Image: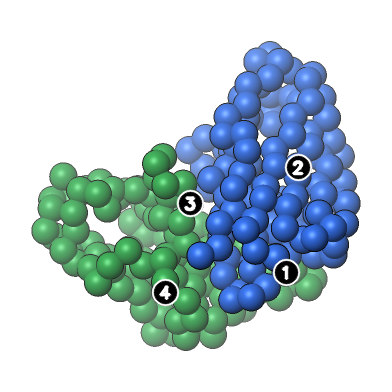
Chain colours: A green, B blue
Amino acid sequence: DAGVIQSPRHEVTEMGQEVTLRCKPISGHDYLFWYRQTMMRGLELLIYFNNNVPIDDSGMPEDRFSAKMPNASFSTLKIQPSEPRDSAVYFCASSGRDRGLYEQFFGPGTRLTVL
Amino acid sequence: GQQVMQIPQYQHVQEGEDFTTYCNSSTTLSNIQWYKQRPGGHPVFLIQLVKSGEVKKQKRLTFQFGEAKKNSSLHITATQTTDVGTYFCAGWSVSNYKLTFGKGTLLTVNP
């Protein structure tokens, strides 16, 4: 398996633009997580899905952020409109009941810069 | 809401010295996981602890879960330069099943 795939790896955009981050989880995993990492705030859980259904979105900063999981192999995190304070590394992670553990496998991340 | 405090924030050691990072949760945890993130990389799973008082070892790494399932520690014996990175704990709360990561401990090792 290729692991968790995220695209793009780097994104530079201007304030006010829409940004869409994409994630392909590991096949067979039933949990998918979106995280944001900054120096100031550390690693923050934004939202997670179980079997494509959003379970907890309390970490989503505000209405400008939205996440979808239309099927088991694809998820998006959208920011509209983007602001400079959204600059961060966004990680997607997936998890499944392997050996009784829900170990999270992280993707390589998308480094977002909003100018 | 649930908080997971991790200390210290930074730790610099000489190669061969020991290292410990501590994790404390404001709520009881169903389990706790530890991850390591190398500079410029992504978090990688190290271990999961589930039982009260559980101790697990991975070579030079020793992980403990407190009796009350509200705290945990990671101890590295005789650090090596390959141990450099940020170590995170992540706890699942029993009450509301929320996952919270600690802010991590950045370990640097002087060869």
Badge 4: chain ID: A
| Mark 1 and mark 2 on one chain | yes
Q: Which mark is residue B74?
A: 2
Badge 3: chain ID: A
Which residue is denoted by mark 3 in the rendering?
A43
Q: Is residue A65 above or below residue A106?
A: below
Q: Amino acid at mark 3?
A: Leu
Badge 1: chain ID: B
**Residue at mark 3 to residue at mark 2: CA–CA distance:** 19 Å
**Which residue: 47% across, 85% down?**
A53
Give x and y (percent) for residue B14.
71, 15
**Residue at mark 4 to residue at mark 3: CA–CA distance:** 15 Å
Contact between marks 1 and 4 (CB within 8 A): the answer is: no
Q: Amino acid at mark 1?
A: Ser
SS of the residue at dot 2? strand
Q: Amino acid at mark 4?
A: Asp
**Residue at mark 1 to residue at mark 2: CA–CA distance:** 18 Å
Of the residues tagged 1 and 3, which is closer to the observer?
1
**Residue at mark 1 to residue at mark 3: CA–CA distance:** 20 Å
Q: Nearer the viewer, residue B70 or B111?
A: B70
Q: Quadrant of residue A100?
A: bottom right
